[in-house]
Image: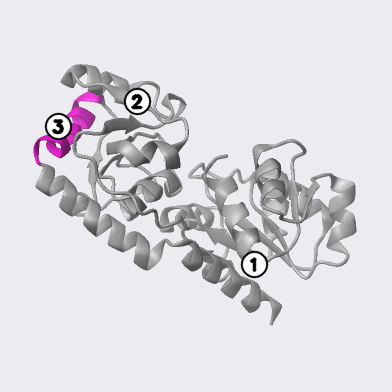
Amino acid sequence: MGGGQWQVLRLVERNGGTLLARSGSPLMKEAQRGGVKTFPLTFARLVRFVREAHIVHAHDARSHTLAALAFPAKLVVSRRVAFPIRLDPVSRLKYAAATHYIAVSEHVKGMLLQARIPARKITVVGDGVPLCGFRLHPAGRILVNDPRKHAGLAEAAARELGVEVHTVTNLERDLKDASLFVYVSHAEGLGSGVLLAMAAGVPVVASNVGGLPEIVRDGETGLLAANNPASIAVAIRRMLDDRPFAEACAARARSMVEERFSVEAMVHGTIKVYRRILK
């Protein structure tokens, strides 16, 4: 389950509706465990549902393509990734098919605008994360995100410092005894994992890329670093050596998440888009 899948699940759990997901996928299994009305995603099934649905909401590139081909009356597309949008004729038709786009950050909205999607068709709705009740563990583990996102930069920074880091396997569980979360990425729409760490009261060091600076305000809600081991190491060392500073960053970050990035805020923002396009 990645950040996008959790957003889909939390939205459907609170707002109702029918979920179409890849058969046997982690999202489908989680949804079924939670009692969500779920069916395997096939084009034929999607076409049948489109006939009755007031809105079809596509949450990734493949479902966007399938939904555009099914011609729903109203199509909402969530855009979470920070990759450039292709501007070839086929892509133009696909992107023109959406009634409205939900961008996960201002950075992603900017990329949609660069692809010539009108501003009136874009609304920014940030991720929503549960507000965990964890307490900061000053002597806890240093967590790093999946190396596939950063090609070992975080581990190289840790070796430079002579500290041990632990790769996340289940973020919500692993945060319970963490003292720091290091999130390094080369492209990021917003960073739901960072928001989850903030909600848990864990200080954050993150890459200065994509939408991450929108939530990690350098020196206020965390520290930003360039994508090289030396810069990452400097940020980690500051968080480890100045615990009052780290705790103050974590407290401000937690308050920001409560105000702007709760699950309820995400659901409310999404429903406002639905209501607007149904008028």
| Label 1 sits on residue | 15
Q: Residues within 10 Å of mark 1 (few under 14, many from 20)?
A: few
Q: Earlier in the sequence, mark 1 or mark 2?
A: 1
- The label nearer to you, 3 versus 2, is 2
Secondary structure type for disc 3: helix
Rendered view: 125 above or below 90: below
Q: Residue at x 12, y 48 (%)?
A: 245
Secondary structure type for disc 2: strand
Q: Main secondary structure of the magenta part?
A: helix
Residue 96 or residue 154, whichever sits in front? 154
Q: Which mark is residue 166?
A: 2
Rendered view: 270 above or below 230: below
Q: Residues within 10 Å of mark 2 (few under 14, many from 20)?
A: some
Q: Measuring from the top left, give residue 198's x and y in whole percent.
A: 33, 50
Q: Which residues are magenta?
A: 229-242
Secondary structure type for disc 1: helix
Left/right placement of residue 40 relative to residue 218 reads right
Q: Quadrant of residue 208?
A: top left
Residue 257: in magenta span: no
| Label 3 sits on residue | 237
Q: Residue at x 41, y 61 (%)?
A: 261
